[in-house]
Amino acid sequence: MGEVETTPRVEELFEHTEWVRALAVRLCRDAAQADDVAQETWLRALTRVGGARVARAWLGGVARNVEARSRLRDTARSERERHVARPESVPGPDELLAQAELQRRVLAAVATLDESARQAILWRYYEGLSAEQIAQRLGQPSSTVRNRISRALEQLRVRLDKSYGERGAWLAVGAPLAADAPLATLTTGVSMASKVWIGAGAALLLAAVTWWSSTSPMSPSAELEATLPRAEAQLSETEPRPESKSDETAALERTPTAAAPAPRFERILVWGALAGFTPDASGTTQQLTLNFADERDQVRRATLGPDGNYSIFGLTPGRWRVGCLQPGYVPLDVDLVLDGSAERVRHDLALEPAGRVVVRWLDAASGEPLGADVDQALLAGVSVVATRGEPPQKSWIALRAMRHTELAVYERVRDWPRGTSHSHADGVLALYAPPPLTAYAMLRDTPFASATIEPGTREIVFRVERAQLEPMLARAVVRCVDGATGRPAVGEWVSLGFEDGGGERAQTDEFGVARFERTLAGLRRVDADRYLVSASRWVNLTPVVENDLGELRLTAAAACSGQVVGPDGAGLSAKMAYVLDEADVVGGRKFTQLSTGAAIDGSFDLTYMPAEAFHLLAWAPGYAVASVHVGAQRDGLRIELTRGVEVTAKLARGAVNFRSVRISDARGLPVISDWLGPWTPRRWTLASGEYTLEELEGVLVTRATRFTVGAEPLALEVQAR
């Protein structure tokens, strides 16, 4: 029997990305068309992957079919252009003014449509949404939306016929715009943001009306007579009917008039090139993203293409803050002002390299690279941080690859080139600021060596004295007890973890005792988990001595149910979290966001909840966070939401690393747990009252700011450290 073909998974299809792109280039006449063919190929692949058997052969067939259909559409469009186009190849000033006037009349006609038709037209041709996307917004069938758009285009065409007196007068003016907007743009849901050649929404809408008219099976005069009686009642009388003109009136119209005021574009295409950025030769660097933030901190993003160019459509006039964070480069943070006078704006950018430095670890006694013989507790806790001054208070963020720290990211390199003598502890330090800098070798939170990074530094070496690190180790013992029976919990796995994850595990013996002989001192989290059972708390281990962590009582999880309602008593779908009643000695109260919440009718039935008392929180868009205390009563809970006030929090300019924040109310109850980034402002809804915003490093509070929420929206700014 032959080998049975299996349906490839989506990730298997994406292995052929470069091959699909190369095939599209061979099939098409230019790079832009090849991009369109490749994009449409992947769109069909993702929606019809179940039909694939041999991935490359199937993708090739899809790509060829897409290219053939595109070629047929282009041929049909060329025929329509020759049918309606005027002889002039380059429009003159009079023709441009005529097109501008035609666009103005189209906009005036849109304003006369009924609300549903006007909404569909604006979403389709000004926001670039497809009929399916509009239908999803409205909760209606896509066929209804398409019919609504068709009827709206019919009304706009009738209005233009009435305004100009005959179809040919305005059809000839709008033909060049229809030629500039391909048929695929007018009849399918292609996003305007992804097409750099699409102009303003009015031009695209006019092109759609022109194309709609030029493809009508009826003659212009017959169609005009058929549609005018139906549309007469729907047309506004804001523009007078065309009347016969006297010779004097005609002469006045032939008199030169002042130029029309320059148009103001509300949807602008910004494009340009980014200089100075070079992806890693290994290809492991993530695709660079540019962030565009408006004056309200709403962020739009543009992805850098393989040719170093970018484009983003739909920016509005005003001031935009443009930037990005990329390891190995100085953070980009510049302003862009759009006055609306141009439909397309070129804005070139440049990244300034900050440098990458190889970090090597050597045994101070032998001079050899640190190898697998080094104690794993020490090896896992070593990291590097670069700053302009003193080392940071905490370094745990630096221990995970691609996490932002003060001014650098340290990433261990797993596979060095053959023939090198690097150890598996060595790595690369990607800087965010140009030298001079000071690099600190740290064992978790304790610096034990330093090196200076000067301009031109390519490698730094840290010599590790094992005798120096030994005093940083500690021993720990913890006892586990079954909360239901009081007997020792035998065979349970106990974890002693760090703030950022990772750590060691040990299993309890016949007495329910778990021992850790060599572990790093400092802030650690001890916890034990089994099915429906959990217990955890934060501890601070003292080096050298044995730390008695006490007893962990493993108690069965519980459940609770109830409903979340709004001010009118109706059920509300909401997100939920819980906060333990008792505060941890180190970390304070535990805020845990749930992966499930209240259903659409507001009902909730939660399992695996703590057995001890806790506060259950709920919030929904536009409503303030509300809570209910849960003790012995676990059924029939009711959480009432009230309208709240929007509170915005963002990092001040100059911040590189992320901030973990927690907001507590006047009772000290945490109601928000979130994080802020340089390009990730957060918006929450809170009830009026007094609050405290706490900045955290791990579970420790580094700074607290009090603020008051009144009746008006409030903006908070967290200063850079």
Image (cartoon, rainbow, N blue to C red):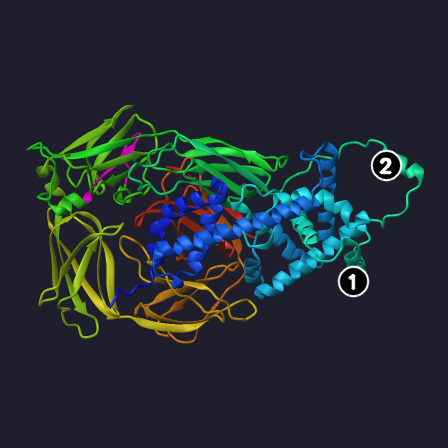
Measured as percent of width and height from the top left, residue 95 is found at 73, 36
Q: Dot 2, crowdedness within 10 Å: few (<14), some or many (≥20)? A: few
Q: CA distance from mark 2 to mark 1?
A: 32 Å
Give the extent of the magenta segment.
381-393
Residue pointed to by mark 2: 253
- In the picture, measured across the screen, residue 491 lies left or right of residue 123, that is left
Q: Which residue is mark 1?
A: 230
Residue at image position (18%, 75%) is 485
Name the outermost residue toward the top.
Answer: 455
Rendered position, 187 above or below 32: below
Above or below: residue 452 compared with residue 508:
above
- Counting residues from the start of the chain, the first of labels 2 and 1 encountered is 1
The answer to whether marks 2 and 1 mark residues whose Cβ atoms lie closer than 8 Å is: no
In the image, residue 602 lies at what x, y percent? 48, 70
| Residue at the image position 38 percent from the left and 33 percent from the top | 277
Q: Secondary structure at mark 2?
A: helix
Residue 198 visible in the shown view: yes
- What amino acid is found at the position of numbered circle 2 in the picture? Glu
